[in-house]
Every structure is written in C-alpha cells, then in structure tokens.
Image (tube, helix red, strand yellow):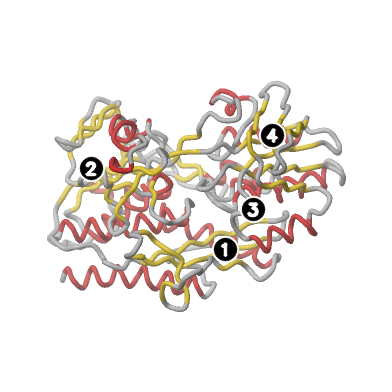
Amino acid sequence: MNKFNASTSRRKLLMLAAAALSSGIVPVVGHSDDGGREDNESHNDHDAEGNYASGNNTTMALENTGLTGKVVVIGGGMAGVTVAKYLRLWGGSGIQVTLVETNPTYTSNIMSNLVLNNSRSVSSLNYGYTNVANKYGVVVKHASVVRLDTASKKVTLSDGSDLTYDRLVVAPGVDFMDAYGLTQADYETKTPHAWRAGPQTELLRTQLAGMPINGTFVMTIPKSPYRCPPGPYERACLVADYLKSYKGSTSKVIVLDENASIQAEVANFTEAFQNIHRGVIDYRAGVSNLQINPDTKAVSYTDQLGLTVAINPHVVNPIPPHRAAGSAVGEWLASASLNNSVSNGVTDGRWCVVDVLNYQSTAVADVHVIGDASSCGLPKAGHVANQEAKICADAIVRAIGGQQPDPAPVANSACYSPITANTASWLTAVYQYDASTRKMAVAANGGLTAGAKATEASSISASNFKQMSTWFNTLMSDSFA
C-alpha cells in the first residue's frame, strides 16, 4: 500500500465526516437503526486467562501495509476502543494493539439521562469488546494498571503480566472530585452525581421515583470544562418532564449553575426552561460556595448578589467538578501529568496538555492522551472522543511509517439533547486546527472564522428525537462494532 495515499484517504474520511455533519447528516459511517439496544454482544468468548480471543478469530481482512509496531491502549471507553479499532484498520495486520480495560463492558454515558424517566434501561447502554477483538484482532486484557514505566516503555498489569510498547495511548476518562462537602461515598450512596452511567444512574432514578407529589429536586452544574456541555441542561429538562407527568405539575427542578450562563444550546434550552417547562424549572446561574448535607439533603449557596440562600429539597443531584482520571493509569498520569505545572503537561492541575496534531503528551514522549482527559480545545463528549481517537490513530500510523502528522486535522462534534419524553434538540460543530493557539477551534464558512460558534437545531421537535436514535446507534457501532 502506498503510505502517502493511505494517509490521504484517512484525512479525506475525517474531512468528509465533518462536512456531512455541517449539513446535518449523521457523520459517522456505520450501521444504525431506530431502536434502543437492550442486548448487545455475547461475552462468552474469553480465553483461559479471561482475555477476549483474537488472532485466528479475526474476521476483517486487514491489509499488510508493511508497518510493524506495538501499541498499548489504556482505557476502553469511547476514545480507547475507537483508537484501538482504527489503529488496526488503518495500520494493518503488522500493528499489534492491546487494549487494557478493567471492566468487561462499557456503559454509555450518552443517552443515560433517559434512564431517569424510564425511557431506557442501563443494560441497553452496555457495550462489550467482542467485536473489536474478533473482527480487528485487538487483544483485550481485562485488568488494571499497577505500574507504568515510560522510560522502559513497559506497563505492568494487575494480572501480573507486563506489556511493552512502541507507542502508548492513554484514554482514562475522568475522576469526580470531592466537592460541596461531599465525598466519593456520598456520591455512591446518598447524593449521586450519575455523571458516569451505571449504579449511580439507577440510584438517582430510584430517588426520583420516590419523590413526594409536588416535591423539589435540586441539581448543580460545575464550572466548565466538564463532560458533555449540554448534558446537565438536558437532565434538568427530562427530570422536569418526568416530575410534572408523574409527581404533580407544581413540582420544582432548581438548577444551580456555577457558570454565568447556559453553556450549550442556549436558544433551545432557554426555550425549554422558560416555556416548555415553565413553572417547573427554576434556573439560577452564577452561584458559588455550594454546600450540600448528604444526610439531610440541605443545600446552601451564594447568589450573584452575594446573599446566602438555603434550600431543603427532597432529592439533590450534585454534578461535581472533574479532572483527568489518574488511578486508571498508575503512577505516570497521577504524578507526571496531574500537578499544577503547565511545563509538565497540564492546565489548572486537572487536564493533560497534548500536541493536538497527534495527541502526544507534552510531558512524556510516545505517550498519547485522548478523550475527556485531554486539553485540546475540543468539548468533552463521546462523539468528540471518537474523533480524537481517529486523529490520534492516523498520526501514530504515520509516525510508524516515518511520516509527520497531518498538519491540519479536522474534527466534528455532534450531540442530541432530549427535552421531553418525545422531543429533542441537537448541537453540531466542525473544528479545525488553529496554528496560532495550537488548539482545535470552531470553523465556519470553510475555514477558521473569528467568533464562530456551534450550530444548534432551529427548533425542538419530535423528528429530532427520532433521529437521535439513529445518530446514537451509528456512533456506537462505529466505535464498538
């Protein structure tokens, strides 16, 4: 295979995806359908060591590109699984890829707010690693990282095995910080943030179902950046829709936003708050000094006028600030990247700074950080993680072939936001590399334009809600199938 042509075709794929998205077309190539997935893949194809089998079970005819190398990927979320798949798909049969992920299944955060109003189940959001192992020959090891030695390029796992690598990709996601007087134990058992789909989502759904008639629900939104910019406002809408349908029309959803204003889909969420859910949602921006009692659920904060306000809700849902996850990748991310020194590759002590052309860490050579953990100018979201993974995969394949990364990468972001049980909005943007800031920036009119912003749906509609399932299933298929 001609390496230049292969690199060009990969770039064209990304650019065509971005162009399609800007026209409102689903941007990811793959199978989709209109229904939710209650059951996904069988997880009975493990070998004797508990790893997904690969090698002879690979069904994709991967090209022999002449490239060889070992890549270890830590973290099997949207970013990790996508980069593992596309490293094999684009790099060919000579690129050995091992994916390290503690959990046997991934639970999608996307669409998880619909669990709260009983539109979906948590199980319908579970995705396994069978396809990426059997179709693409990725070796999947279900273990945790015990030690990461970047000098010798070796990863030690909890099962006692060592993995050597030429390139390491770290996709750990986020950790949620203790905040507002709450601890991790409080999040797990009393005041769930449910910003990582799973048991906390179920707990919050149960708490909602147990609310009294015309009760009060309080949720908090941390300062940006946080995972999924429109997500908290979407949650407020779905909770309001559920409460006024099942718990009384004078139920209250009080939204305490630490940001000065709505962070995404401003027009449609303003419409939702002021008209669709009028009288139920009480949106309060610019709050500070939040304090929450996990036992009594009492909430206090300082408003924009400097006054202290107290609320006694029936259910409180704090979405705490978060940071790049450290424990998922052992010593390196915890000590070398997550401190307060920009020279060591982080901003504000929370996010890993990367070279956006290849997502290589600015702290350690041959280590790439993708997904929510990185600081690159892109929003933190599942669709974006898929895009970052492809740019990173392309750059690694080029590097193995002795080439430089694409000097002008393009990415896109898309998400749908349910507003009621059967209506939704959406948000989309195309991003290009800005050489002046070395970050990705929103593009418009075929190039970087000062002040360009993401585009939101012209209205909230039932047709958007139907299209949401197609977008979601297509995205998840592209990453996991």
List the residue tagged with mark 1.
Answer: 427
The picture places residue 59, in percent across and down from the top left corner, at 30, 55
Alpha carbon separation for disc pair 4 and 1:
31 Å
Identify the amino acid type marked 4: Tyr
Identify the amino acid type marked 3: Ser
Check whether the beta carbons of the residues at disc 3 and disc 2 lie within 8 A of each other.
no
The numbered disc on residue 364 is 2
Question: Which circle's residue, 4 or 1, is located before the other in the chain?
Answer: 4
Secondary structure at badge 2 equals loop
Identify the amino acid type marked 1: Leu
Which quadrant does the C terminus fall into?
bottom left
Q: Nearer the viewer, residue 405 or 290?
A: 290
The picture places residue 132, in percent across and down from the top left corner, at 35, 50
Alpha carbon separation for disc pair 2 and 4:
41 Å
Check whether the beta carbons of the residues at disc 4 and disc 1 lie within 8 A of each other.
no
List the residue tagged with mark 4.
Answer: 301
